[in-house]
Amino acid sequence: MIIGTAGHIDHGKTALVRALTGIDTDRLKEEKARGITIDLGFAYLPLPDGRVLGFVDVPGHEKFVHNMLAGATGIDFVLLAVAADDGVMPQTREHLAIVDLLGLSHGIVALTKCDLAGAERRSIVSADIAVTLAATGLRDAAVIPVSTVTGEGLAALRTALETAAAAFHERGGEGRFRLAVDRSFSLTGAGTIVTGTVLSGSVAVGDRVAISPSGRSARVRAIHAQNRPTETGHAGQRCALNLAGEGIVREAIHRGDVVLDPALHAPADRIDATLRVLRSEPRPIGQWMPVRLHHGAAEIAARIVLLGDAPIAPGNKALVQLVLERPIAAAAGDHFVLRDTSAQRTIGGGRFLDLRAPARKRRTPERLAQLAAHALADPERILAALAALPCAAINIAAFARDHALGAAQTERIVGRLGLIGIAVPGGMLAFAPAEWLRLKRAIAATLADYHAANPDLSGMGRERLRLAVAARLAAPAFAAVLHGLAQHGEIVLDGSWVRLREHEVRLTPADAAVWSRMHDLLAGRERFRPPRARDIGGLLNMPEVEIRRILKLLGRMGKVDEVAHDHFFLRDTVAEMVGIMAGLAARSDGDLFNAAAFRDQLDNGRKVAIQILEFFDRHGVTLRRGDLRRINRHRLDLFGRPPETGPQTQPGAAAFDPLHGREAFPVGRPDFKSGRGRETVSGGFDSHSLPPHSRSAR
């Protein structure tokens, strides 16, 4: 169990820890000279049963509240110190508010310096403490009178802490590993050491970890957990990690960084959250208000975007979006605290909901419904609620990453919910069974109606179909759905067209006979320079207009493509030419190729080669850059075969790739819409409203 102190300056926090553990947590020369705690101090108390209590001693001075916040990360139990001669003071209230905002509800109040107060004074201060605690999570905390001078109450306090530790339930270790760094230093013969509290998961000697948000990679050489050497560190322990790796030096890792499982490295700079404003705040929270965000041991400039219609009054709670100056390493469900930009007061705090918040359409009914799901208590309930929303396709890998879930946890949750999985490159999209069935039926009904209205067309365009049945489903997700249905034979994909399996456009017997003769003229060795419609008419001794009519019909059926005016190529030939261009691009420097190389591959004339390339330019398959062209790999399946994907139920752990997912949006963008007039305002930070900062971390 990790115990964190709290309380006003000179209320005896450090002396109390020293009396309990025998360790003086004031380690800095300036702390010794001034007699106050400036930075975090750490001590440990071994218990008779072999467990070890860790103490994080925090400064009480108002100028060092930011250090107090860094120390409050990951603590399990609060030791609130209130001096009997002073009583409840300003930093007592602020520390208590911070503890409450961080969701801490277990603790003890030590009524310190009781040697300076009589029974009547103790009674008055104890009553004041009870009133102060009444509206917080520590309302039921016991008050124990103590004195580090006379020793009064120390045995009772130690017994109370041991009892609390015995009843304390250790944090689960199933999640992926995260450690919030509060110190980084180097030791001769060892190298770089970082210390902090393990927020989730576990780590072992030899593990590969990442330093986020910088992304540096490191290896764990040694571990001290609760001040003892060990092979593993677990959630809820204070650990010191000896790290090694390229660029892993003391100066490269800072307080506020997070050492984590590499699968979790995906920093966020735009986060949707709940915000509770303290009653002590003098005015409501307005749109785009600048603040200092404290999360874990990190402190970062941010702006508040209101997701409601009115400012947030003191004492109220609302949904907001936090736009950060630079990315941080976080997980959904983490608590945070906001202070004003001058570091004079604590404004409020709350909990992160969605780390991949959108920059636009953030207040639509659909988005607010998603946030209501994200606000639920645990990942399984969140995933179930998200999957139940209309047109919901959940990126399971990104969901697991943002909630720091382990592979076994994720597989178990998906299996219990009975979600339908669609494999996509790098992960899995999940649908609720009812939503999956509704989507399949909607696709089938839409295609059936389209075929009935257009019997001479081979199918419906993919984008047109998406907008008709699932306008809110993203195009990549909808493409994955179509590929899954196609693999199971429920629909057929033909380039950019979609049709039902049983639908088939048939030519009349007369047209079919003509097409049989024309096909031989468009195929074979001359397929890259086929005759034009008028030439085909001459070769077949048929009217040119009739040849053109049949070719136009075949184009709608997806059999041929009109590459240039009156110049038709077989669809298989067009797909073959796409492959040739892709091969040229892969073999060239910079993924570029020119018309001459393409002409030579086709053994064709330059004029026809240019017409073919311009056809691909129009369809977005190639991107022209002067005399060169670059392949657009997102459009390669327009005339070719779709990738092999399909649905799976209860996907295994191997399907979840936490490194894929939508990145957060950059801060410096004029995309913010204010609440009332919707007028556009600047989306960046300015030098007048926020303290100066360095861009080097970017």
Image: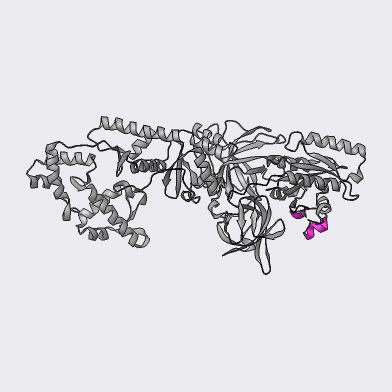
Residue bounds of the magenta highlight: 22-44
The stretch drawn in magenta includes residue 42: yes
All told, the count of numbered labels is: 0
**Residue drawn at (82%, 46%) of the image:** 157
Residue 341 horizontal side relative to residue 612, left or right: right
User: In which quarter of the view is residue 285 placed?
Assistant: top right
**89 displayed left or right of 554:** right
Residue that lies at the very extreme toward the bottom in this rendered image: 189
State whether residue 545 appears in this view.
no
**Drawn side of residue 183 relative to residue 565, left or right:** right
Q: Residue at x 74, y 34 (%)?
A: 135
Q: For the C terminus, give its image quadrant.
A: bottom right
- In the image, residue 575 lies at what x, y percent? 27, 50
Residue 225: % across, % down = 69, 57
Q: Relative to residue 123, is residue 149 depicted above or below?
A: below
Q: Is residue 553 visible?
A: yes
Between 279 and 14, the residue placed more toward the observer is 14
Residue at the outermost left position: 541
Q: Is residue 366 magenta?
A: no
Q: Is residue 580 above or below residue 123?
A: below
Between residues 136 and 606, which one lies in front from this camera angle?
136
Give how far across and how far down residue 400 sits, in percent. 53, 46
Q: Position of residue 595 (x, y in %)?
A: 27, 58
Decide if residue 634 is on the left or right side of residue 348. left
Looking at the picture, tell me which residue is in the foreground, 366 or 589. 366
